[in-house]
């Protein structure tokens, strides 16, 4: 049996890594600080252009936009599991009743199993923290003293890691009910989200959605049809199973913005026994790898007659309790996940009620998009087409949506009728 903490640390590093999608892809591991506090550095990207200056001027000072650096008290995550004499006397999981193994022989195996289970529980909590930050810009941490208090949700101290000023600005509101949108309207909403991030200096590359959103999109025949046209080879929808319940649904190109679609439905069991989703149903998130990082503070505990500190991501510990005739396997971690730029992503939910004013406007005017080899076409309504007064404008619009063969020798009314018929037959409008 191994008791020394530094040996246990090396042992846990050699175990198979726990794959956590949000944490690994968007908040990968960073520094481990040999202190109780962790340094967090954030900075808005901005889009400021450099100035021109006359030759005799050495330069013009450009102020740094939104840089912040501050120290945070890292939270404590410290689950533990007991090993009792009775547990060692019984056969282990999967062990043959005729194995003849002694309690001492089972001890190392059970110790390793408990350590691995606790390591997984730490990473699940960290995954939930990353999900909270992406959804709300903050993560609220309730620190309990006992397992009983944790199960009942009482007697805790609350701390909050918050990464926004005043108002969380990363929540996007769809203009109308998502389920009532046409395929082109859904794609336009996605483009608006990507364009909003572009204006902030961010290039979104990932579209992460829950399973219900994925089913809504991938069961939409018209949505799939955008990427099945032979003349438009700009996207693919090929599901591929990934670890930890994540599915990659392929890549799509939305007016030059290439997005990888992921379906994500990870769940965890909280301390009160309730199973919770990291992302609630209806979630759509526009993200990019490396949004931030996860830094760690040191772990300090009593050993013998003094204190010892370890600057590691996860610190395992084995404590003997002779009075109660048991051992405790403990695992400590002090993570701080944070974004580099607190406005570098967007989240939306298809079940959010759209603003009433926008809904009424959308009923009066419907925006339609169709793809061509270069991007998207902004289809005009019948009212807009009939309002045209020049033949050249009607012919130019006809050619932009794929209708050729019209000429100015035809009557203006004939040109408009041809465009309306072609648009209805081709695009259903």
Image: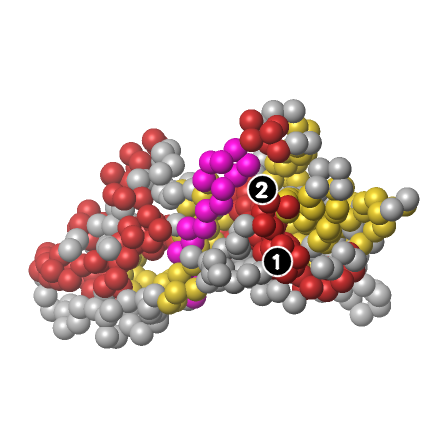
Quarter of the figure with the N terminus: bottom right
The residue singled out by tag 2 in the image is: 137
Q: Disc 1 on helix, strand or loop? A: loop
Disc 2 crowd rating (10 Å Cα; few below 14, some 14-19, many 20+) is: many
What residue lies at 25% left-to-right and 38% top-to-bottom?
363
Residue 315 relative to residue 256: left or right: right
Q: Quadrant of residue 364?
A: top left
Examine the structure image and report whether residue 227 is included in the region drawn in magenta.
no
Magenta range is: 258-275
What residue lies at 79% left-to-right and 58% top-to-bottom?
4
Residue 178 relative to residue 142: left or right: left
Disc 1 crowd rating (10 Å Cα; few below 14, some 14-19, many 20+) is: few
* In this view, 55 is above or below 2: below
Q: Which mark is residue 102?
A: 1
Q: Nearer the viewer, residue 348 or 242?
A: 242
Q: Nearer the viewer, residue 305 or 123?
A: 305
Question: In the rendered structure, which disc, 2 or 1, sits on the residue that comes first in sequence?
Answer: 1
Q: Disc 2 vs disc 1: which is toward the camera? A: 1
């Amino acid at each position: 049996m191994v008791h020394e903490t530094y040996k246990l640390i090396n042992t846990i590093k050699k175990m198979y890594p726990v794959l956590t999608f949000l944490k690994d892809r968007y908040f990968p591991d960073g520094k481990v600080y040999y202190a109780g506090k962790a340094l967090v550095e954030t900075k808005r990207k901005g889009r400021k252009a450099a100035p021109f200056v006359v030759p005799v001027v050495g330069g013009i000072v450009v102020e740094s936009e939104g840089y912040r650096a501050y120290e945070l008290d890292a939270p404590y995550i410290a689950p533990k599991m007991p090993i009792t004499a009775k547990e060692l006397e019984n056969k282990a999981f999967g062990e043959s009743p005729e194995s003849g193994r002694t309690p001492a022989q089972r001890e190392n195996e059970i110790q390793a199993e408990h350590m691995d289970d606790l390591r997984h529980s730490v990473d699940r909590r960290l995954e939930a923290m990353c999900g909270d930050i992406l959804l709300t810009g903050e993560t609220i941490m309730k620190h309990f003293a006992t397992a009983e208090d944790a199960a009942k949700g009482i007697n805790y101290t609350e701390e909050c890691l918050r990464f926004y000023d005043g108002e969380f600005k990363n929540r996007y509101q769809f203009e109308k009910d998502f389920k009532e949108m046409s395929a082109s309207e859904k794609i336009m909403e996605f483009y608006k989200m990507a364009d909003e991030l572009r204006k902030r200096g961010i290039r979104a590359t990932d579209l992460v959605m829950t399973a219900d959103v994925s089913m809504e999109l991938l069961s939409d025949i018209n949505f799939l049809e955008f990427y099945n046209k032979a003349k438009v080879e700009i996207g693919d929808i090929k599901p591929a199973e990934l670890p930890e319940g994540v599915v990659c649904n392929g890549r799509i190109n939305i007016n030059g913005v290439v997005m990888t679609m992921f379906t994500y439905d990870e769940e965890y069991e909280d301390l009160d026994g309730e199973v919770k989703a990291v992302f609630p149903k209806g979630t759509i998130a526009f993200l990019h790898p490396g949004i931030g990082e996860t830094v760690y503070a040191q772990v300090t505990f009593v050993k013998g007659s003094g204190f010892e500190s370890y600057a590691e991501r996860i610190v395992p510990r084995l404590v003997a309790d002779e009075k109660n005739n048991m051992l405790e396997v403990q695992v400590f971690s002090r993570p701080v996940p944070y974004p580099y730029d607190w406005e570098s992503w967007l989240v939306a939910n298809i079940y959010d009620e759209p603003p009433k004013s926008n809904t009424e406007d959308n009923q009066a005017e419907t925006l339609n998009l169709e793809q061509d080899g270069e991007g998207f076409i902004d289809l005009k309504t019948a009212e807009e087409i009939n309002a045209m007064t020049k033949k050249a404008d009607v012919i130019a619009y006809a050619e932009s949506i794929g209708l050729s063969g019209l000429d100015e020798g035809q009557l203006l009314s004939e040109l408009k009728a041809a465009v309306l018929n072609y648009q209805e037959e081709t695009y259903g409008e």
